Image (cartoon, rainbow, N blue to C red):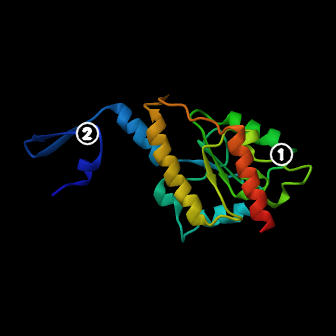
Amino acid sequence: MKSALDSLQLLRRHKVVGGELVLTSVDFFVDWARKSSIWPLTFGLACCAIEMMAAYASRYDFDRLGVFPRPTPRQADLLIISGTVVKKMAPAIETLYNQMPEPRFVISMGACSNCGGPYYDSYSVCKGIDKVIPVDIYIPGCPPRPEALQTAVFALQKKIDRYWDAGKRVANPSKPTNEVLKEINVAALKARDA
């Protein structure tokens, strides 16, 4: 019969008198802690923030996943951009992002933060938060459900597992090309017109 320890990588088990001894490196536990305790900055801009707050409520209970919202960027390692980003707000978001310690991650939640959403044609709306700060995970929808945010956190955990090893970046995620961004914008315009 396999135990939960068998599924973990980089663990060595030894039988000793009175039980078992498990040996691993400190790096494994550092990476495991980083992946398992994501602290997002409590930052909501529009209606998607209501769905983000619902994800923290008792029905979805992000606390059990190790996701504890933090009120200050100096304690947070995840920035969830949920809602419409206007050009006047973009420098403040960039400042918050720069105040976060490394490694830091960004989830773009909803059509408005992804590509401007229904306000794409407005003179004051940013055409996507990825024009201001790098984004790790995009969540589509208007507004996306709390389950989508939960799935995005799981995807971010997998990405952290892939890209980080003992606090050192082992692979750099690539930024989307202009062609990909244009395709996203075209798809958003088609979805808006439908």
Q: SS of the residue at dot 1?
A: loop
C-alpha gap between disc 1 and disc 2: 46 Å
Q: Quadrant of residue 22?
A: top left
- Residue at the disc numbered 1: 89
User: Residue drawn 56% across and 47% down?
Assistant: 39
The image position of residue 94, as x and y in percent, is 75, 38
Figure check: 106 above or below 83: above
User: Residue drawn 65% across and 43% down?
Assistant: 135
Q: Which of the marked residues, 1 or 2, is nearer the chain's N terminus? A: 2
- Residue at the disc numbered 2: 11
User: Residue drawn 71% across and 41% down?
Assistant: 179
The image position of residue 145, as x and y in percent, is 62, 67
User: Residue drawn 81% across and 66% down?
Assistant: 193
Figure check: 3 above or below 30: below
Of the 4 image quadrants, the one containing the C terminus is bottom right
The image position of residue 79, as x and y in percent, is 65, 46
Q: Quadrant of residue 50?
A: bottom right
- Relative to 97, 22 lies left or right: left
Given the image, on which type of amino acid does mark 2 rest?
Answer: Leu
Given the image, on which type of amino acid does mark 1 rest?
Answer: Met
